[in-house]
Image (tube, rainbow, N blue to C red):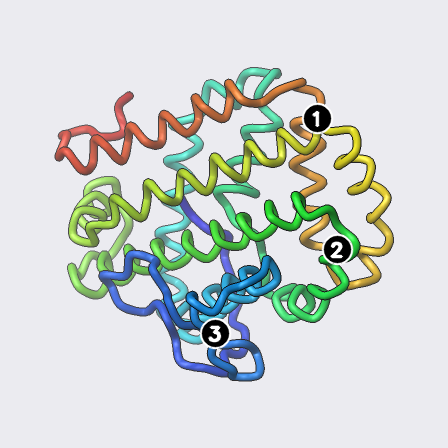
Amino acid sequence: MHSNTMHAIPSPAPHAAETPMSTGNADLVYTPEGHALRREDIKTLADQMRFELGRFRAWRSHSDEAFREKFVAVQKWQAGRLTRTHADFLKDERYEAVTRFFLTDLYGGLDLNELAREIERALPVATRLLPDSVMRTSAVALELNALTGELDEAVAAMLFETLGHREATEQSILEAYNACQQHEARYHQLDLLAELGKGLDRYVRSRVIYATFRIAHRPARMAGLGGLYDFLDRGFEVMRPMGSAQDFISLFISRERAIIDNIRDGKPDPYAL
């Protein structure tokens, strides 16, 4: 699983996830103002979203240009692997749109470079504008994005810095995966992906929630939540014609889980399903 290429942004506080062995369990982050926010202090959805944005800001690739190139190399390999694994979905007109959404928006992550501060400023307004269920799904999206970046940065650091490889290949990536021992964190990543996909699917089939979401279109943009709103809207639009995306989501997740199982178990060709 990978995360969209992120361009450098200012980081006002120490990094929370730079070690090669990181498993994505940040317990302390910093707000843009430099205030500490601990996981144990999370009391509301807004707190949760601020915490996940703090994890995003702590990515090493935001401030280390040389490392960012290594991070991007891992991302590119991951993107190619995902496309190969789910090629049949991409060729099926029933699933092409939702598969691309999963590969680019959910697996790919939110591009928060321009939006992180705006989202935080808009959170008090957002909690009044958008249904609680939609805000909950937004928090899951931010957590998935933060975790994905942390895990992929750890792989990049292990691959290029600790193991000394010069390029991302199937064999070198596997070596880095095994050295990082991220299996449990990767399972959690899939749990978040499933929760996010099923949340979007469930909400699009609720007339009340969907109608409330549509009404909030203009106010959300005025509040600075345009990027987050567009992300949710893309999910709604690709899932709405399907009636239910549950079968697709279950199959997609089961494939990715099987690959993690294979890597954990030391299978010689873990991507063969």
Circle nearer the N terminus (3, 2): 3
Mark sitting on residue 226? 2
Q: CA distance from mark 1 to mark 2?
A: 22 Å
Which corner quadrant of the image does residue 124 belong to? bottom right
Residue at 53 percent of width and 23 percent of height: 90
Indicate whether 60 appears above or below 13: above
Q: Nearer the viewer, residue 250 or 85?
A: 250
Q: CA distance from mark 3 to mark 1?
A: 36 Å
Q: Position of residue 158 (x, y in %)?
A: 22, 59
Residue at 41 percent of width and 34 percent of height: 82
Q: Position of residue 77 (x, y in %)?
A: 36, 44
Kindly identify the amino acid type of the residue bearing the numbered disc 3.
Answer: Leu
Indicate whether 240 appears above or below 106: above
| Helix, strand or loop status at disc 1 | loop
Is residue 162 left or right of 254 when viewed as pictured? left
Q: CA distance from mark 3 to mark 2?
A: 25 Å
Residue at 43 percent of width and 21 percent of height: 251
Q: Nearer the viewer, residue 146 or 163?
A: 146
Q: Residues within 10 Å of mark 1 (few under 14, many from 20)?
A: some
Read off the residue under disc 3: 37
Is residue 177 left or right of 24 when viewed as pictured? left
Read off the residue under disc 1: 205
